[in-house]
Image: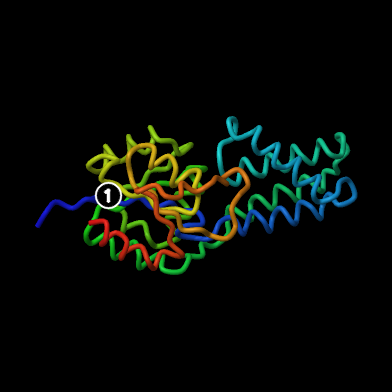
Amino acid sequence: MPPRRITTIGFDADDTLWQNEAFFRLTQDRFTALLADYADPDHLHDRLLAAERRNLGHYGFGVKGFTLSMIETAIEVTEGRVPATVIAELMAAGREMLEHPIELLPHARTAVETLADTHRVLLITKGDLLDQERKLAQSGLGDLFHGVEIVSNKTAPVYAGIFARHGDGADRALMVGNSLKSDVLPVIEAGGFGVHVPHGLTWALEQADPPDGHPRFTALPDLGHLHDLVSRLG
């Protein structure tokens, strides 16, 4: 048999294997309702997004940074007059997000289980370390992965390092995820294969244009098609 072209497969976690963005949207709706007397929804959304973008370098990705950005935005739009009860509600909303049960997405378990029999499978996710570890433990998928990497950001050098440590290099690796910006484009830049599985809800700061026509890019409707794709790639 000729050597396998793809030997290592990386899976994103949030909104690829389990639900995530939906909970952020629900909390943002709660945030909007709490501050309805101070700002209209569109303006509030823009201010919150600006705060999130501003704070990524300080707080990183995840619920804790999102909660701090909501509090910061509440202080800004009320010119420092936000009631303590609203701050308390926002903190409670953040804690609820950190305690929310994991909901696996369709075909997630089957996709990981099937490919783990023939390839090295990795979980590569970014965000808060404790929260990502909690979600992985609750998902029931932890024992299926040959390696887990929780990183502060996903860039081409980060992927190159991960696939060198856990596999045969990026050129023999494939990464699957819902974010073009984080899961697809940097992997292709590193020399690997990027597979986009859209979720339906995408955070504004994760949006990017697909590299249509690139020989190492594929879009799939769901994880149920992943095994056939990997088989075709060899």
Q: For the point 25% across and 52% down, which residue is it?
A: 120
In the rendered image, which quarter contains the N terminus?
bottom left
Residue 52 percent location from the top left of the image: 66, 39
Q: Residue at x 58, y 30 (%)?
A: 57
173 on left or right of 44 = left
Quadrant of the image containing the C terminus: bottom left
Give the image location of residue 190, x and y in percent.
Answer: 35, 37
In the figure, residue 56 lies in which quadrant? top right
Q: Name the residue at the left extreme.
A: 1
Compared with 17, 77 (above or below) is above
**Count of residue discs:** 1
Q: Which residue: 39% across, 37% down?
A: 189
- Look at 31% across and 52% down and name the residue there: 9
Residue occupied by mark 1: 8
> Looking at the image, what colour scheme do you see?
rainbow
Please identify the quarter of the rendering in which residue 47 is found: top right
Left or right: 165 with respect to 225?
A: left
83 or 185, which is in the foreground?
A: 185
Across and down, in percent, residue 45 comes to 75, 47
Where disc 1 sits, the SS reads: strand
Label 1, residues with CA under 10 Å away: few <14, some 14-19, many ≥20: many
> In the image, is 205 to the left or to the right of 42?
left
Relative vertical location of residue 59 with respect to residue 86 in this rendering, above or below: above
In depth, the one of 141 and 214 nearer the eye is 214
Q: Amino acid at mark 1?
A: Thr
